[in-house]
Image: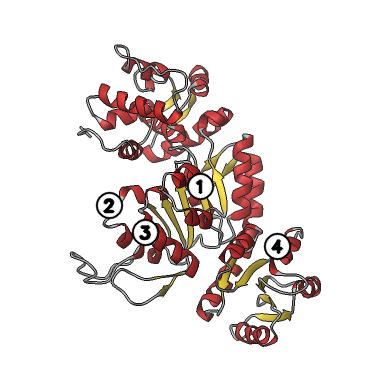
Amino acid sequence: MSQRVLIVEDEPNARMGLAELISGWGYDTNVAEDGLEALDRIQAWHPTILVSDLKMPRMDGLALLSHLARQPDKLAVIMLTAQGSIESAVESMKLGAFDYIQKPIDPIRLKRLLASAGSQQQAEREIENVRRKVQETGVLGSLVGKSAPMQEIFRLIERIAPNNVSVLITGESGTGKEVVARTLHELSGRSSKPFIAVNCAAIPETLIESEIFGHERGAFTGAVERRAGCFELAEEGTLLLDEIGEMPIATQAKLLRVLEDRTLRRLGSKVETPINVRVLAATNKDPATAIAEGHLRNDLYYRLNVFNIEMPPLRAHREDIPLIADALIRTMNERHGCQVTGIEPTLLHEFESYNWPGNVRELRNVLERAVVLCGSGILGHQHLPPGFGVAHISAVFDSDQVQMPVGTTVDEAEKRLILRTLESTRNNKTRAAEILGISLKTLHNKLKEYGGSAESSD
């Protein structure tokens, strides 16, 4: 049975033209001239996809979306927008639209969107099964947690994963932002297509545009052949732009244009290439601060932040630590061929009491070392790094502790702790990152913020 597409458009010629075009692709079509008539058609005809104009008399596209959001059967809605209506289009996606397309309509893009919207219906059905599993096990993809903060994040992921909506994922380093992005991809209709993650902080400023948008042969010195960028590599899939605040402002302007026009131009090319990519972004910085300091464009933030998922630090949901640890041990057992069966109760209590400055990443690193050392049986204190936890960090500063007066900002306290730890390790960044419970990449990013770093012994 072919899918049913309801076209809602107040202009008669455009309405019938769309119906003829879409039916030519093998879809059953029906039409309505505004939102009120569309509601009647939905009740009588039961379409699976809705293609609706944004501006209409009596009931416009946004009002129609609001009505549909209250109905149990979810439709994949594609909004038609005029030039200059990007803000309204983004608002429609917040209300549950699958995606939008600008007028005059590009038939190739519309055909792709209809195919993707059809895949969304399958993803919606799969999420019902996922939802039951989450309630039973506290597991969503590679994310684990039964606490209130994690369950709220799971509900948000379940809601927005099938849509084509952009998401900004925020939170401290090590909280699992990339895991969230992968889960959004895996629960979407794009799951069989590529997931590409690019760390904007790790690419030199002179190369980042080529890395993201691609380049033609001869576009610059050293460009000996055409190269596809991350957008093209992620075609029909998902692109994660990690540490988006580290992207140069000029590149952010080009990215915004790509997001709005859904086309890109490789460096050195005169041709616009249509793209079909869902874009997710992540940052460990406060977006408002990044905007105020000139590191993040306000208009790009608005475009990316259709939905925000803020990952809590591990210390904010300590009750999940036993569940997370158990899942990590199973993973490490499989990876390293070990047979660890659990954690000593006193050690697990210490895990729940520890502050975990490096969050889940630090817990994973500690457990991986412990599982390898233990091999089989129960993990104990003897399998942990020497001086694990608070004692581990305090030992570094026996002779010269970091002291901060009341009124010191969190950012300044973090800076002092990082620099003092680096000093104590004689600029060995790898060792300093281990002590601080953060990744080496995060340490480099922090030192870059502070205006440079000492020579390292990585």
Question: Where is residue 189 drawn, in percent x and y?
Answer: 55, 62
For numbered disc 4, what is the local secondary structure?
Answer: loop
Name the quadrant containing residue 43.
bottom right
Cα separation between marks 3 and 1: 20 Å
Question: Where is residue 211 drawn, in percent x and y?
Answer: 32, 60
For numbered disc 2, what is the local secondary structure?
Answer: loop
Q: Give the amino acid type for the residue marked by disc 2 in the picture.
A: Pro
The residue under label 2 is 204
Cα separation between marks 2 and 1: 23 Å
Q: Residues within 10 Å of mark 4 (few under 14, many from 20)?
A: some
Q: Can residue 403 be seen here?
A: yes
The residue under label 1 is 169
Name the quadrant containing residue 173.
top left
What number is the disc on residue 251? Answer: 3
The residue under label 4 is 74
On screen, residue 112 above or below 180: below
State yes or no: discs 3 and 2 in contact (Cβ < 8 Å): no
Point out the tag, 2 or 1, that comes first from the N-terminus. 1
Q: Give the amino acid type for the residue marked by disc 4 in the picture.
A: Lys
Cα separation between marks 3 and 2: 12 Å
